[in-house]
Amino acid sequence: MLVADPRTAAAWRSFRQEFADAGPERRREMLRERANQSRTADLHMIGRAGLGHVGGDMSVLDILTTLFFSVLRIDPEKPDWADRDRFVLSKGHTAGALYATLAATGFFATAELDTFAGPLSPLNGHPNRVKVPGVETNTGPLGHGLPISVGMAVAGRLSASSRHVYVVLGDGELQEGSNWEAAMTAGHRRLSNLTAVVDRNRLQQGARTEETNTLDPLDDKFRAFGWDVLEVDGHDHLALHEAFTAPRGERPTCVIANTTKGRGVSFMEDRVEWHHKVPSAEQIVAAEAELAR
Amino acid sequence: MSAPVQELFDCRVAFADELSALAREDERIVAVCNDSVGSSNLVKFQQEFPDRLINVGIAEQDMVGVGAGLALSGYVPFVCGASPFLTGRALEQIKADVAYSRSPVVLCGMSPGMAYGELGPTHHSIEDLSWLRAIAGLDVVVPADPAETRSAVRWAANAARPVFLRVGRFKVPAVTGDRDFTFGAASRLRDGSDVTVVATGTMVSRALEAAEEAAAEGVSVRVLNMSTIAPLDEDAIREAMRDTRAIVTAEEATTTGGLGAAVAAVVVTERTPVPMRMLGVHREFAPTGNTAFLLEHFGLTAGDIRQAAIGLARADV
Ligand SMILES: Cc1ncc(C[n+]2csc(CCOP(=O)(O)OP(=O)(O)O)c2C)c(N)n1
Ligand SMILES: [Mg+2]
């Protein structure tokens, strides 16, 4: 099991404090910069490992950064704190994005990212809670995160805790029927302590979602299952922050975050082949330059 | 000891070529997949037969059910998905809709074993042989190289019964020569008199290498390519018990219910059992690592097979 890095955790804490005190423009800038640092870290991890899911990583990083750097009530130095908010990355193939975020939060030392997918590394190609603090459950097969999150939300209710459960789902992932079983349970039980975020980049592994198996109208689907639905620009940090923290009603909340797969790297954006293509060294340099802008 | 450089093959290529060839001959042939057109190597099939590729999206239970419906309506569906999700996620559909209902579906478990290396245990399919061997009426076939893959695909298209075909991605050399796949029959790739190695899939070439090395140390090893795991060629096992003194099994799978367990079930019910060693994964989730690293980690190299064979040959039992 990896252990927390107290220095990074302290820096994360000051970030959270500064964010709380900052005005909207500064807040936006802080999260944007932080997310792009994670994008760069992730690109290097993928380059070194020779594998990864870069398109979905770039797509989800504004969501992850907003959650970990401005929303989640967590303590990287106390990953087992009972009343922490729970975060589940159901689209586990974007483990690289999660690891970069967890390291930046201080759950473990940033240097560990160099071992990503290497022999005996705790940082497996899909997240493993047994080895990595901050990972709440092992994911990788799509369609598992939402049922588990429903269980966590039910547990929160049972123990009268104010903790909130956030789960990030891929849009292609929603083709798995297990999601809809869980969506029904959450709606039925009025789990207002649950927020499902859909990384709506409209691409899956091999094609566009709507050309593979239509998901639209996604908002109506969730509403019909008893959820409140918010739709936001999934790269607008303040809009995400607002959607994640707005007061909840009586129902679970689905945040449809409209995103671009490959976001931030022009030659990857909205291109299906970048689902799991590995960028060359030159492409990483070019990407890094774009992200530094 | 350095092995001669051999050409290595991804069996998915032979699989897809043969499937397209069959589809040209037989209009009943269709493919069903789960957002896995690329990973199942079906891009060309899709170009040539756009209407006959049914991509249900990321929905394995639906995929197998749809396959069963097509089979029950006179089509010959090849249901293709990464083996861990096809077998793990849709196990009940495989049992009830395919095997129990006797729907002639060809389930194609792509990239099985530890082919997905660093993607980890969620993406490894080492339990598939144990799970599927437990299901009545389901044939379990594991080709060892591209030629045998082609031959098995052709057989499966005409088998008119529930079949699981394990289609390898981890590259292997050609080992079966011009032998056709014969359903239900072990194929003796090398004869020997001291120990028999019964291997399947990726382990077959390694078993042959091990036999070669053992011969240099004075141990004579028979190698059986067991490309049908269920039903098992029990006669070949009994013959091995008669002709050689011990049996080693080797599979890129858990030993709890796959090839090793199947062979052991024959061995222990004979009047005079022979000593056995089962090589495979023993109820453990893999650590992080690429496929070659993991095969080494779990003792599945040619050297490990040779050592097991020599150990049994020299043990005074
Ligand atoms: C059950 C299951 N089936 C198939 C896969 C293979 N797979 C990994 S990622 C992926 C595409 C996911 O698309 P989406 O959910 O839209 O994620 P994103 O676009 O954010 O990468 C697929 C099919 C899997 N991991 N699990
Ligand atoms: Mg997507």
Image (tube, rainbow, N blue to C red):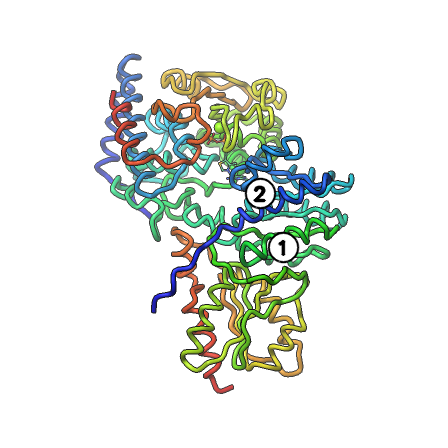
Q: Does B33 sit above or below residue B311?
A: above
Examine the rendering and report whether any part of residue A75 can be seen. no
For disc 1, the marked residue is B151
Could you say which is closer to the camera, residue A47 or residue A40?
Answer: A47
Tag count: 2
Pointers 2 and 1 in contact (C-beta within 8 Å)? no
> Above or below — where is A175 with respect to B264?
above
The amino acid type of the residue labelled 2 equals: Gly
Is ligand 1 within 8 Å of the beta carbon of the residue shown at mark 2? yes
Relative to A221, say whether B196 is above or below.
below
The amino acid sitting under disc 1 is Ser
Residue B102 in the image: x percent, y percent?
76, 50
Res B81 label: 2
The chain containing the residue under callout 2 comes to: B
Q: Mark 2 vs mark 1: which is more N-terminal?
A: 2
Q: Residue at x 32, y 46 (%)?
A: A2
Q: Name the chain under label 1.
A: B
Estimate how packed mark 2 is, as few (under 14), some (14 to 19) or many (20 or more) residues with alpha carbons within 10 Å: many
* Image-quadrant location for residue A30: top left
Q: Where residue B141 sits in the image (x, y, percent)?
A: 62, 57
